Image (cartoon, grey):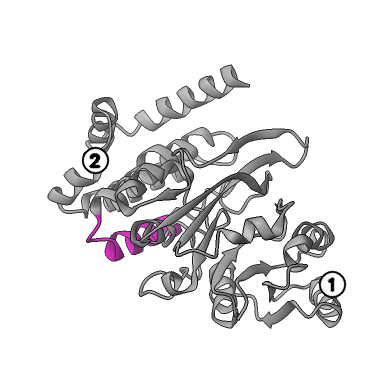
Amino acid sequence: MSLLSIVVPVYNGEAYLDAFVYSVAPLIATGQVELLFVNDGSTDQTGRLLDEMALHQPSVAVLHVPNGGQGRAKNIGALAAVGQYLWFVDVDDLLIVASAPAFLLQLAGDADLVLVGYERVDVDSGRSLGQYLPAVPGIDGTPEEIARFDVYGHSAWNKIVRRELYLQSGHAFLEGVIHEDLAVVPLWLSRARKITFDRQVRYRYGVRASSSIHGNFSRHPDLIVALSHLMDNGDQDDARIGPSIIKELFFYSLPRYAGGLGKGCSWASYMQCYRDSMTMYRRIPAARRSRFTAQFSPASRIYIGATAAGCFFLPLVVSLAKRVRDARNA
């Protein structure tokens, strides 16, 4: 069994393969890492290029499956992987691991999760959009501290998960939705017995205008499905799961749709997003809603309550405030 399996779902990724594989090469060279590509029904030369690569590199494995989306491809890859740990990454991003042996030492302990630092880069301009490192000093976190790491995101690509944690009930990726990470990563964070923090940038995330999530204003129902899964499977841990649900509904999704008005998002789409979000919020029992919002500031709780009470325009104000803040920080 390998120490680490890097699982890479790929759909029409021929343009990114060379750069990605070059970035992973130091890890492959250790002999402790499996690189597993899941060709998700590509229609370009991705499949042929991957097969050629696997012929010459014994640490590289390739699975070819009919197109079924990222969640399904990740799950198929995870079940076929041989590593003790799983790292789900995107082929159009890059890994940054100069000293692979030192990096892999972090997996020699008993951590259930390793959170790595990352950098967001604007692909068109090459400009760095900021580096993000674990916010808590030190290298280890206990479950009692995990609630403070919500700001570290719900994407899987900056988190290396122990196989046993991934295999727990409800922890596999949702299939057929574009928010497959959000539905399960908070559960990983909540149920990990120990988390190790790597305060080095190990992942370079490319920000693209064509992102399936950030530029899509027609698949808000996918978010509701993901949050419903999260709520149903995290009912024993409201203090950690609840803030994730509230943030997605009131502070991420609604302001994103509001900010997209006139830029691909119609008023009808925004109002549908608002109605769906409020329906989701109201189906949460009142006692759970109170626990969900307990960690927010008084001002945030007022915003949440007023928005839920019918003030549909408030997310537009939040979106405008974010744009002003970003402009000042640019």
The quadrant in which the N terminus is found is bottom right
Q: Is residue 311 magenta?
A: no
**Observer-nearest of 170 and 35:** 35
Q: CA distance from mark 2 to mark 1?
A: 49 Å
Tag 1: residue type?
Gln
* Nearest the eye: 192 or 307: 192
In-image side of 293 versus 147 (left or right): left
Residue found at the very far left of the displayed protein: 287
- Mark 1 is surrounded, within 10 Å at the Cα level, by few (under 14), some (14 to 19) or many (20 or more) other residues, namely few
Q: Which residue is mark 2?
A: 293
Image spot of residue 320 (x, y percent): 48, 24
Give the image quarter of residue 3: bottom right
Residue, far top:
328
Measured from the top left, where is residue 82 in percent x and y? 60, 80
Residue 6: horizontal and vertical position, in percent?
64, 68
Is label 1 in a helix, a strand or a loop?
Answer: loop
Q: Earlier in the sequence, mark 2 or mark 1?
A: 1
Q: Secondary structure at mark 2?
A: helix
Q: Is residue 50 left or right of residue 33?
A: right
Residue at the spot 75% in from the left edge and 66% down from the top edge: 12
Query: Which residue lies at the image location 28% right of the left edge and 34% below the top edge?
Result: 296
Instruction: Please name which of the two marks, 2 or 1, marks the residue nearer to the observer.
Output: 2
Question: Percent x, y for residue 160?
Answer: 54, 61
Compared across the picture, whether 216 is left or right of 100 comes to: left
Quarter that holds the C terminus: top right
Numbered range of the magenta stretch: 221-237
Q: Which residue is denoted by mark 1 in the rendering?
A: 45
Q: Is residue 11 above or below residue 65?
A: above
